Every structure is written in C-alpha cells, then in structure tokens.
Image (cartoon, rainbow, N blue to C red):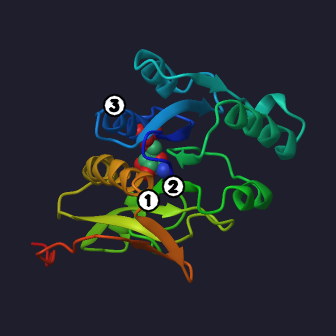
Amino acid sequence: MNSPNSRLRVAILISGRGSNMQALIEDCARADNPAEIALVVANKADAGGLARAGAAGIATAVVSHRTFADRAAFEAQIEEKLRAAGIQLICLAGFMRILSDEFVAAWRDRMINIHPSLLPSFRGLDTHARALAAGARFHGCTVHFVRPEMDTGPIIVQAAVPINSGDTPDSLAARVLSAEHRIYPLALRWIAEGRVRVENERAIVEGAVAAADLLINPRA
Ligand code: GRF
C-alpha cells in the first residue's frame, strides 16, 4: 500500500476514551511498524482520547457534529482534515457517529473498524449484555473493513474470549477490550505491510497462520 521508505499515513476517529487509539499509537511508535498515526479526529471536544493523543505528540482535531447543519457538512470538514494530513487509511475506534454511504464509499477498503463482538453476531450496541443474555459461551471482537450497513464488511481478524459463569457485562467487556487492544494493531500492521486484500467481499491476509489450538468453552 505504501512505498518502502514511506509509512502509511493513518487517521484515527474517536468519540471517547480512546483506549484502542492508544494501542494503535503505541504499536505504530515501534520502529518496525510501517504505519504512522498522523492524525486523531474526535467529534466531541471532551473525548478523553484527545489528551492521550496529544501526550503522544500526535496531531489532533475536533470536528463537532453539533456545529454543522447536516451530516454532509460535518463529513466535508472531516474530509478536509484528512486531505490536509495526507491520510491514506482511517481507523474507527469508538467513533459513535454514523457515516454516510458517500463517505463510506469514498474510503472503501481504506477504512476499518473494531467492533466488540464476533460479527456477524451482535451488531450494534450493548454487545456484552446481549451475549450474556443469549447464554453464549464465547464472545470477542472483530476488525473489519467498513461498509455502509453498520457493523458489516469484510472481516480482517477476530479474537474470541470465553464467557465465564460469574461474568457481568463489565467484566466481559474488560476481557474483550484487552483482546481488542491486541488485534487492532495487528490488523493495521497487516494492511500497512500490504498483506490484506479484499476478494468477493472477503478479506484475505497473506501469510496469516491459523491458531494451533481450537478454543472450546463448555463453561462450568
Ligand atoms: C470499544 O469497545 C470498541 O470496540 C467500540 O467502542 C469501544 C471504544 O473504546 N467500537 P475505546 O474508546 O477504544 O477505549
């Protein structure tokens, strides 16, 4: 995706605390990472992640959806920030605004998202409570390319975590979140290394090695 001596320029879009953003920033700070976090955009001025990004020396911008008449004007301002920073790939990391079909189409196969479930199960919100209510034995997280329909698109990587009998939505969310922090940087690296392509709406990761063991969780 990028030439050998230039790093892939990445923007992260956030709305909140930005722990996934932080994981991406930390991994991209390693010398062997071919991606560079060039910009963090938040749609809320009080997003906790902004301070974390600033502390890491990353350029930040606030584009508040409240200050624009409509979605098109809001997105045009985001596009302007991305263009000015020479952004090549967008990572959504807890970005809580729906993006228009036009915006998604413009960034097709150049925008990825992390979702706290094993898609296609539990699209949308409150995934942890819903997985518990369903009596699922496993939950997890997914990094995928973004398509217009929310929480759909070619899956790049997933991690599964067991659901334990005493779990609450919060304890389960914490277990999933630490898996998120592992797979999101992995997916970004693979893309920056030029190893990910989309064929027939499936993402193929070159050189991906399957886990040697299967996770089976009968649960006590
Ligand atoms: C994460 O659970 C992510 O999967 C979801 O929103 C949450 C964002 O958390 N899309 P953080 O801001 O990255 O800490």
Q: Amino acid at mark 3?
A: Ala
Residue with the mark numbered 2: 1
Q: Which residue extends farthest bottom?
A: 200
Task: Estimate the x, y position of residue 168 in percent, counting from the top left.
Answer: 28, 53
Q: Amino acid at mark 1?
A: Gly
Element under disc 2: loop
Mark toward the start of the polypeptide (3 vs 1): 3
Q: Give the number of the mark in front: 3 or 1.
A: 1
Determine whether 86 is above or below 62 in the image. Answer: below
Say the numbered circle drawn on residue 220: none
Which residue lies at the image location 69% right of the left edge and 65% below the top edge? 148
Kindly indicate the quadrant of the structure image that contains residue 39. Answer: top right
Task: Estimate the x, y position of residue 47 in percent, counting from the top left.
Answer: 54, 27
Mark toward the start of the polypeptide (2 vs 1): 2
Residue 79 falls left or right of residue 195: right
Task: Estimate the x, y position of residue 91 in percent, counting from the top left.
Answer: 52, 47
Mark 3 burial class by Cα count in 10 Å: few <14, some 14-19, many 20+: some
Residue with the mark numbered 3: 29
Determine whether 210 is above or below 43 in the image. Answer: below
Q: Disc 2 and disc 1: Cα gap in Å? A: 5 Å
Residue with the mark numbered 1: 194
Ligand 1 within 8 Å, label 1 CB: no
Q: Disc 3 and disc 1: Cα gap in Å? A: 19 Å
Which residue lies at the image location 28% right of the left edge and 70% below the top edge? 208
Q: Amino acid at mark 2?
A: Met
Q: Nearer the viewer, residue 99 or 205?
A: 205
Q: Nearer the viewer, residue 146 or 168?
A: 146
